[in-house]
Amino acid sequence: MHQYLLFSPEVAAARAAGKPIVALESTIISHGMPYPQNVRTAREVEQIIRDGGAVPATIAIIGGKICIGLSDEQLELLGTASDAIKVSRRDLPFVLAQNKLGATTVAATMICAELAGIQVFVTGGIGGVHRGAETSFDISADLQELAQTSVAVVCAGVKSILDIGLTLEYLETHGVPVVSVGQRGFPAFFTRESGFNADFQLDTPAEQAAFLHTKWQLGLKGGVVVSNPVPAAEAMPKEEIDRITEQALQEADQQGVTGKNVTPFLLARIKALTGGRSLATNIALVKNNARCGAALAVTMQSTH
Ligand code: PSU
Ligand code: MN
């Protein structure tokens, strides 16, 4: 086993028993949602995965170790600590070697999940190509990770804070399949449609698992985006989210927000500008993804 990995008792037991395991990220806890909803949601999402027949493994960097599966106290720590560092690929050695507290992004969670032998990972939204990337070069490291690390990422698409068309072009260039569940359209996180289609519609866990097994058996390394639209009853009106997104983008520009601070800044502004309604949608879509991811992990395990 890898020297940096530390499994929680629940995840260690799941590994020993050959049970399906679902990875969860922690930047969504530290930088994606406010306290206490972040910690409550993290716990509820873990329970949904258990109810779906799999074992949740929330991943974070604590005490110089990659923790695979967190205790209640560790979830609380990540949800409250003001010094939790947002950890993507480039930050991982620094945060581990310096014994700092790290919350993993999609990219870093994929790396850690692969090290731990976990193939299915559930989150809310992935990073992507930012609007104006042709001059800012702001492209999330999540996309490069999807190109090289063999983990399926169940998400609700990407937010319209990003350039969704360019994000899909980038994924195509790097050979990352974008699968959609229950509809042909690629979802845009708060809304069910983005105006773009996914590459392949695969509605059932059996079809999704067969796709993943085939990709990896062919030696085609890299991730797969499994995009699962927010339930219709929880989606936000498109006009409202578009208007608020434009305002948040303008504020980020005016305030000179750059680098790794861009995404957390936009997420926090959108939440504030919608008076918290976007948070309710965010929570609902992550839970919906947890149901989808648990079913996929169970099927992957029974058909490998
Ligand atoms: N998008 C969301 N919610 C999130 C994130 C993105 O809708 O919480 C987080 C994820 O952890 C993602 C990261 O991996 O932000 C991307 O950050 P960046 O754009 O700096 O790569
Ligand atoms: Mn960025």
Image: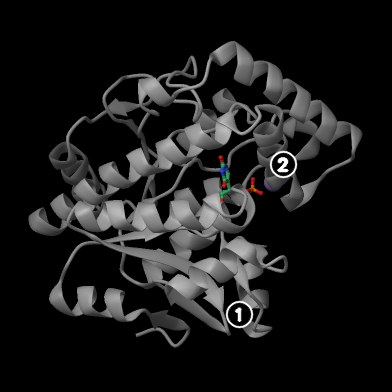
Q: Secondary structure at mark 2?
A: loop
Q: Foreground residue, 109 or 292?
A: 292
Q: CA distance from mark 1 to mark 2?
A: 25 Å
Beta carbon at label 2 within 8 Å of ligand 2: yes
Is 2 situated left or right of 208 in this image? Answer: right
For mark 1, what is the residue?
96
Work out whether 4 lies above or below 298.
Answer: below
Q: Residue at x 38, y 19 (%)?
A: 185
* Mark 1 or mark 2: whose residue is earlier in sequence: 1
> Is the C terminus in the top left, top right, bottom left or bottom right quadrant?
bottom left
From the image, state whether disc 1 or disc 2 is nearer to you: 1
Q: Residue furthest bottom?
A: 3
Residue 260: x and y in percent read 72, 52
Image coordinates for residue 262, horizontal then vertical, percent: 74, 43
Residue lying at 21% horizontally and 73% vertically, measured from the top left: 14
Q: Residues within 10 Å of mark 2 (few under 14, many from 20)?
A: some
Q: What's under tag 1, amino acid-wise? A: Leu
For this rendering, which residue is in front, 219 or 130?
130
